[in-house]
Image (cartoon, rainbow, N blue to C red):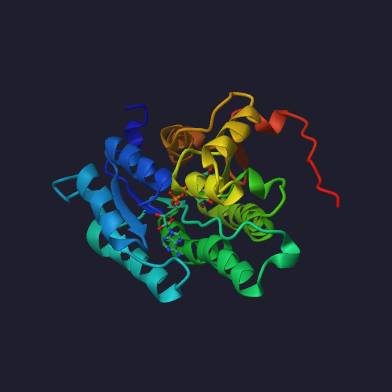
Amino acid sequence: MPYPELRSRVAIVTGAAGGIGSAVVRRLAAEGMRVLAVDRAADAVARVARETDPSGENVHAFAADTTNETEVAAYVAEALARFGTIDAFFNNAGIVGTMTPLVDLSEEEFRRVIDVNLVGSFLGLKHVLPVLYAKGRGAVVNTSSIAGLESTLGTAAYDSSKHGVAGLTKVAALESSARGVRVNSIHPGPVDTGMMTEIRRQRNPADPDADGRRMAAAIPLGRPAEADEISNLVTFLLSDEAGYITGATYRIDGGMGAAARLAVIPRS
Ligand SMILES: NC(=O)c1ccc[n+]([C@@H]2O[C@H](COP(=O)([O-])OP(=O)(O)OC[C@H]3O[C@@H](n4cnc5c(N)ncnc54)[C@H](O)[C@@H]3O)[C@@H](O)[C@H]2O)c1
């Protein structure tokens, strides 16, 4: 494995039952890290931990809702109690929410998406950073999206939340830079996970595969990312090889950022 310094270090991964989170759990475990895998889907995250490390020694599942500060404090306490320290944090849990024009979006749904994607990310930083500050070393990766850099139609809550994560990352990076702690955000384009299945279903309930083909055609590399490809970037950013990188916004989007796009605006 390419990052020997990661061996025996401790990581927390949220959204660990999902496509990207579980890929990162597997990759960090393969690097020899000890991992607390956090997700509100208790059975699913327990399965990820069991399948990654049948011994249960190095990968442990913890059920928590990242929007609940008590439960966030509990996952940090669990990592410290079980592994004695925290070195790395993949702050990744998220939802897409209902995709609909802004004027049709309920306040409740807007708040729900902001709560998970932005408030949950904030709470994770609030409780993990002091542990990293105390040891004077650590690395954090927050999951934003290309939707945290630009926007599309029908995703007001998601795009606002992911732009928020980009801002949160920069503040956290500045506040952490004198304390030996790096904080970066990743901005994936479409990734082949359960979330992408849901997006296709919302955009074209009659034919989600047709939406998938349309989306792939808009990606210069011609396909969505595999979750393992996202884990390559996350692992690099958590490693010492990224020691001079903080406050950065990392696109991983198959070339979408290089393409001038003309949003097709529906006019009635
Ligand atoms: N799939 C994509 O195309 C894509 C693109 C850009 C960014 N992202 C982001 O990547 C991250 C991971 O998404 P994914 O594609 O793996 O989706 P996913 O749906 O497979 O995984 C998301 C996981 O987060 C968990 N989760 C949701 N809300 C939670 C909460 N309040 N507390 C604890 N756990 C919670 C879910 O249970 C799920 O296991 C998300 O932040 C998402 O916005 C995904």
Position of 216 compared to 85: left or right? Answer: right
Would you place residue 77 above or below residue 1 in this image? below
Residue 75 percent across, percent down from the top left: 35, 65
User: Residue visible at 31% across and 55% down?
Assistant: 36
Q: Residue at x 71, y 66 (%)?
A: 104
Left or right of residue 4: residue 174: right
Name of the residue lying farthest toward the front: 206
Residue 52 image point, x, y percent? 24, 43
Point out the residue furthest to the left here: 55
Name the image quarter holding the N terminus. top left
How many marks can you see?
Answer: 0
Q: Is residue 207 visible?
A: yes
In the image, farthest residue toward the top: 221
- Front residue of 205/9: it is 205
> In the displayed structure, would residue 72 be above or below residue 173?
below
Q: Where is residue 129 drawn, in percent x and y?
A: 48, 60
Instruction: Report the residue at 36% width, 31% height from top.
Output: 3
Closer to the camera, 220 or 268?
268
Residue 229 placement (x, y as % from top left): 46, 32
Residue 181 in view (yes/no):
no
